[in-house]
Amino acid sequence: MKYSSTGILQWYKQFGSVDVIDMAISIENAFGGGFIFISKYDSSGFDQLKLTKINNAGEYEWSNIYLVTPEDADEWGEIRKTNDNHYIICGEDFGNFFVMKVDQSGAIVWYHTYGFDTYEESAMSVYQTSDNGFIICGNKYPDYDPDYILYVVKTDANGQEQWSKLIDHNTFGCKVEKIEQTNDGGYVMFGQARLEDGGMDHLLIVKLGGTTDVETDPNIPKEFKLDQNYPNPFNPSTVISYQIPVGSAVKLKVYDVLGNEIVTLVNEEKPAGAYEVNFNPESSIKKPASSVYFYQLKAGDFIQTKKMILIK
């Protein structure tokens, strides 16, 4: 259902049928207008994740049912928009956290699970962080305790785990429902906690210090960067340096002054780090003459182009 800013009901819609479980979990504003939501879908005794797109009037447009990824979805999780015009979805898959990135048509870009071999973990909320990675929070039944404790996972932009935390407040069970990044680079979660066995649930708010709590490698760059080639002008070759703070799909290409691609110097997944690549026009151009060239770095969502000059 949709309400106006003054609380007036604008429309009410129902989706699904009486003989199929279709339990809504989370909704988000869609790119290009309308809304997109996830639900637990069960038409044959097997829980599946369903993604549905509706327009601004609440009319159905399309849906995707993910048959094997995740293999066994449950009734919690979240969908949010990402900075690069995709969607990020979290939830539970056979007792593990899962996070998947999909494009605007619902096609899977990547999918990862996180967790432990025993007991279950349920991802409740996901948020894109300032480094374009993701922070996921949820709940876990620990091996040593029948009550839930908190589980937090931080990933890079491609969903690769960077660190994780188990948080036990020695309560009679606590759960978190939502996580966001704070202005100081930390994270805040809220949920519920039971302070005594059989007692009432209380509001729970947890503040984490973020990356300052985690040991980091000082050799890993803190930002994406494409350096000016050296030497410049050059003859016969030059070195192009770049750095990436997280593992990324990297493409480094050289173009002529008309925009024609001359050569691809890098086209592969690279871990975080600083790199140098040698460029010699004679290896890709017959009888290269003095000219201006452009080199472009694409790494994840980062794109930068610089100019270099060959003098013969």
Image: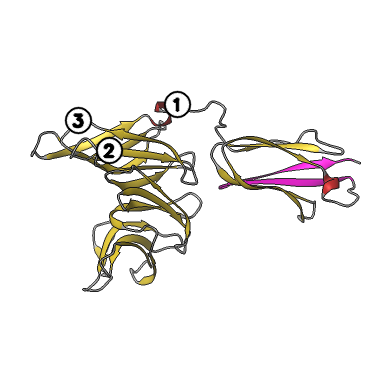
Q: Which residue is labeled 3 in the image?
A: 170
- Between disc 1 and disc 3, whose residue precedes? 3
> For this rendering, which residue is in front, 48 or 293?
48
- Indicate whether 108 appears above or below 116: below
Q: Residue furthest left?
A: 198
Q: CA distance from mark 2 to mark 1?
A: 21 Å
Q: Residue at x 18, y 39 (%)?
A: 147
Asked if residue 1 shows in the view, the reply is no
Amino acid type indicated by mark 1:
Glu
Provide the residue span drawn in magenta. 290-311
In the displayed structure, does residue 65 sit left or right of residue 251? left
Amino acid type indicated by mark 2:
Leu
Q: Please state the horizontal and vertical placement of residue 212, each as a whole percent of the image.
A: 42, 27
Q: Quadrant of residue 227?
A: top right
Q: Which residue is labeled 2 in the image?
A: 150
> For this rendering, which residue is in front, 72 or 198?
72
Q: Residue at x 79, y 37 (%)?
A: 238
Q: Please state the horizontal and vertical placement of residue 68, each as a whole percent of the image.
A: 39, 61
Q: Is residue 298 magenta?
A: yes
Q: Element at badge 2? A: strand
Q: Which residue is labeled 1 in the image?
A: 215
Q: CA distance from mark 3 to mark 2?
A: 11 Å
Q: Please state the horizontal and vertical placement of residue 226, each as a whole percent of the image.
A: 66, 38
